[in-house]
Image (tube, rainbow, N blue to C red):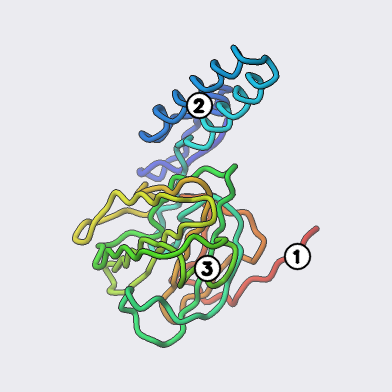
Amino acid sequence: MVSINASSGEMKSATIGWRDYLLPPLHPEGPGFVAIFALAALVLWWIWTPLGLIGLALTVWCFFFFRDPDRITPTRPGLVISPADGVVQLIGPVTPPAELGLGVEPLLRVSVFMSVFDCHVNRAPISGAIIKDEYTPGKFVNATLDKASEDNERQSLVIRTPEGRDFAVVQIAGLVARRIRCDVREGQHVLTGQRFGMIRFGSRLDVYLPRGVVPLVSVGQKAVAGETVLADVNSSEGPREGEIR
């Protein structure tokens, strides 16, 4: 049993059974790919059983790659939530990509790297109106490299909160990832934790924070899309440090 905060503020309980772990919902792109992998596995099984077992394992991997589980998103105003599952790989001040229109002064950037084993559904880091929607073609270098933010193919969104602060979230293609999907466009309004796209197969997302907003995560920390708090606009806390224990 897990307790969650309902919109009314009351505490409610939700039961998470084995089906939620073993048979999570799939992203709309998933069924077609799973079917292709399953068909290939059957052919390989017919050719040689050990190959079929490998195909079966890859089919299971494909199913879980496209999983799209529900998340419990913190809804307190001012919280910036991770847009991706993965590891917080980079935190630091950098000049934002020119297409964002956020100026040339460095902003704090939090980068979350998604491996091929992470859930790849991306979620809005904060509520607001999308004031910029920009696709930039580019290379497919390793997304763990810092230069991927400028060199790689990417899809950028700038979200303006009701208070007038601009946040940017950038989907970046990687060495394996070859397709970025973004389901929202300029002029739309998104809610914190709302699904807005995905990248296949493995990549990273960058979040650019407005001046004065400090990250509340550490490099190396595991982030969960729609749940992990990256920053708090209303917090006066300084940067957090962490260590492996």
Sort mark 2 into few (<14), some (14-19) or many (20+) by Cα contacts within 10 Å. many
Q: Amino acid at mark 2?
A: Phe
Q: Is residue 95 left or right of residue 60?
A: left
Q: Of marks 3 and 2, which one's residue comes earlier in the chain?
A: 2
Vertically, is 224 above or below 80?
Answer: above
Asked where in the image residue 217 lies, by quadrant, the reply is bottom right
Instruction: Kindly check if marks 3 and 2 are in contact, taking CB atoms under 8 A apart as contact.
Output: no
Percent x, y of residue 12: 46, 34
Percent x, y of residue 80: 44, 62
Vertically, is 171 above or below 194?
Answer: below
Distance from Cα at disc 2 to Cα at disc 1: 40 Å
Q: Secondary structure at mark 3?
A: strand
Q: Is residue 220 left or right of residue 161?
A: right
* In this rendering, the label closer to the viewer, 3 or 1: 3
Q: Amino acid at mark 1?
A: Glu
Front residue of 128/115: it is 115
Which label sits on residue 110? 3
Residue at the far top: name it.
46
Q: Of marks 3 and 1, which one's residue comes earlier in the chain?
A: 3
Distance from Cα at disc 3 to Cα at disc 2: 34 Å
Name the residue at 40% across, 76% down. Answer: 97
Sort mark 1 into few (<14), some (14-19) or many (20+) by Cα contacts within 10 Å. few
- The residue beneath circle 1 is 243
Which label sits on residue 37? 2
